[in-house]
């Protein structure tokens, strides 16, 4: 194979890969769940695999959002008013989300394919 033919094949492959990445990224969405008054802004949320949820702290004190669910386990750590942290959901399932500082805070996220 000549160098010019190889370069054309390489360019075509790179374009195809870039197109796939753009399409995949275009499908992903970000939802925002705020925390105010020691509560999440919603009690239930539906997202798709690949979507992310940004947890925005609008309270004058810290929150520590976490989940021990089999479908997605995470601990965002403590963050103050105005802070935000995100989680991307890579698997379908039901995720129970809580705050380690305020045990009455609860949210269920349903991740669908």
Image: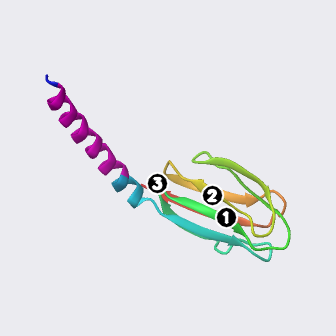
Q: Please tell me in which quadrant of the rendered image residue 25 appears.
A: bottom left
Residue 45 belongs to the span the image colors magenta: no
Please name which of the two marks, 2 or 3, marks the residue nearer to the observer. Answer: 2
Image quarter (top left, top right, bottom left or bottom right) of the C terminus: bottom left
Determine which residue is flagged by label 3.
Answer: 49
Q: Residues within 10 Å of mark 3 (few under 14, many from 20)?
A: some
Magenta residue span: 3-21
Q: Element at badge 1?
A: strand
Determine which residue is flagged by label 1.
Answer: 55
Residue 5 belongs to the span the image colors magenta: yes
Residue ID at (84%, 73%)? 60
Quick check: marks 2 and 1 in contact, CB under 8 Å?
Answer: yes
Q: Element at badge 3?
A: loop
Residue ID at (51%, 57%)? 111
Q: Residues within 10 Å of mark 2 (few under 14, many from 20)?
A: some
N-terminal label among 3 and 1? 3
Please name which of the two marks, 3 or 1, marks the residue nearer to the observer. Answer: 1
Q: Residues within 10 Å of mark 1 (few under 14, many from 20)?
A: many
Q: Please tell me in which quadrant of the rendered image residue 23 appears.
A: bottom left
Determine which residue is flagged by label 2.
Answer: 86
Q: Nearer the viewer, residue 27 or 91?
A: 27
Residue most extreme to the top? 1
N-terminal label among 2 and 1? 1
Image quarter (top left, top right, bottom left or bottom right) of the N terminus: top left
Q: Nearer the viewer, residue 95 or 64?
A: 64
Q: Nearer the viewer, residue 66 or 25?
A: 25
């Amino acid at each position: 194979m000549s160098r010019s033919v190889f370069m054309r094949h390489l360019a075509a492959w790179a374009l195809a890969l870039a197109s796939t990445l753009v399409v995949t990224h275009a499908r992903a969405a970000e939802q925002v769940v705020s925390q105010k008054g020691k509560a999440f802004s919603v009690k239930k949320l539906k997202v798709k695999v690949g979507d992310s949820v940004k947890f925005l702290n609008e309270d004058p004190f810290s929150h520590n959002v976490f989940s021990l669910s089999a479908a997605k386990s995470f601990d965002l750590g403590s963050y103050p008013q105005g802070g935000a942290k995100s989680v991307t959901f890579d698997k379908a399932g039901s995720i129970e989300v809580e705050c380690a500082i305020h045990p009455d805070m609860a949210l269920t996220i349903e991740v669908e394919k």
